[in-house]
Image: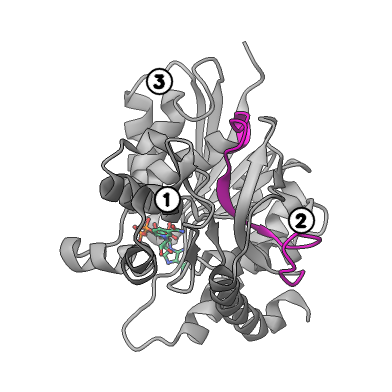
Amino acid sequence: WKKTVHIAVTGASGQISNHLLFMLASGEVFGRDQPVALQLLGSQRSREALEGVAMELEDSLYPLLREVSIGIDPREIFKGADYALMVGAQPRGPGMERADLLDLNGRIFKDQGQALNDVASPDVKVLVVGNPCNTNALIAMENAPRIPRKNFHALTRLDENRAKCQLALKSGKFYTNVNRVAIWGNHSTTQVPDFVNARIGGRPAIDVIGDMKWFRNEFTPTVAQRGGALIKKWGRSSAASTAVSVADAIRALVTPTAPGDCFSSGVITDGNPYGIPDGLIFSMPCRSTGDGNYEICDDFIIDDWLRSKINASVDELVKEKECVGHLIGT
Ligand code: NDP
């Protein structure tokens, strides 16, 4: 048997975790021969619910699930974590400004970043799901100087999956034929789903679909606003497809990326090949050798249209960073 992988999950009694934890325990994320331990973080208000989650996990008799621990102190729950999946965040309330949300969540991520720094595995991989996820990841990273900056990710895989779905529907090809789909920028409506570099059945998506108006006027806003559209229909934000995309995002790190393909993740821009300013958590196309690490792909073409959209997302993230300067010591 392999050495057990320790996975800390915050917001563990929430909607997304309710799907995600069972995927992690089943072996479909880390592999069918990989034992896992789940370390679940809740709060005083979710304590009982968290006990219920642990009971359900135990009753599922997953052969790979070696341990379930629960608690409300990040310094206990993050101890020895190899992966930290940071799902918990305060939702935006009525009348709350974006800056208020940034500040409220920023405090949580400052505290949790410091706790990761102090007690997690020194090579812990951190995936922030809770919104605003790019800036929350930045705050956690800046408060965890012992952990490599490269190890922090903000989830944009759901946006990539949504983009692939739209390309598959439009082209009439099954989604497994769609690859090299990058999401650039912030996990917000300024995100840039990249149709310029996308491929369908090995050919440029632009040639296969051949309708630039559709790409610019329909595809791009449909992907960027998919989350909002789903809330309108469903009355709550996406949970199952988000959990699936978290599983995809982790699998992308622990399995080698196919030649020529990429996966999207919000990662640190320091030294990136596209001229995006350093010091931001920005979604870019990445590749992995399958050992949990990645590099940024350096062969994507940025045309004028992509560049202007990317610049708008940079501006938004720079503003978010300014709002949380007091939490990252800038
Ligand atoms: P839920 O409301 O179901 O769960 C969120 C969890 O966050 C709760 O269980 C709660 O746990 C925790 N929480 C709430 N308030 C606070 C607080 N003040 N401090 C710390 N933790 C808090 O939400 P979901 O599971 O549906 O979504 C979780 C997050 O994921 C949200 O921020 C959402 O916006 C984001 N999201 C991100 C996506 C992406 O693609 N990046 C896509 C979809 C959602 P407890 O009470 O135990 O603290």
The residue at 48%/61% (across/down) is: 130
Occupied quadrant, residue 310: bottom right
| Residue bearing mark 3 | 62
The three-letter code of the residue at mark 2 reads Arg
Q: Quadrant of residue 259?
A: top right
Asked if the residue at tag 2 contacts the one at tag 3, i.e. Cβ–Cβ closer than 8 Å, the answer is no
Q: Residue at x 50, y 69 (%)?
A: 132
Quadrant of the snapshot with the N terminus: top right
Q: Which of marks 3 and 2 is nearer the N terminus?
A: 3
Q: Where is residue 225 in the image (x, y as percent from the top left)?
A: 34, 68
Tell me the residue at 47%/83% (across/down): 98
Mark 3 vs mark 2: in front: 2
Is residue 53 toward the left or the right of residue 231 in the image?
Answer: right
Highlighted range, magenta = 253-278
* 31 magenta-colored: no
Quote the CA–CA distance across marks 1 and 2: 38 Å
Residue 223 location, quadrant? bottom left
Q: Is residue 51 above or below residue 45?
A: above
Q: Is the magenta stretch mostly helix, strand or loop?
A: loop
Whether 65 is drawn above or below 197: the answer is above
According to the image, label 1 marks what residue? 207
Q: What residue type is labelled 1?
A: Asp
Label 1 residue SS? helix
Disc 3, ligand 1: is the CB inside 8 Å? no
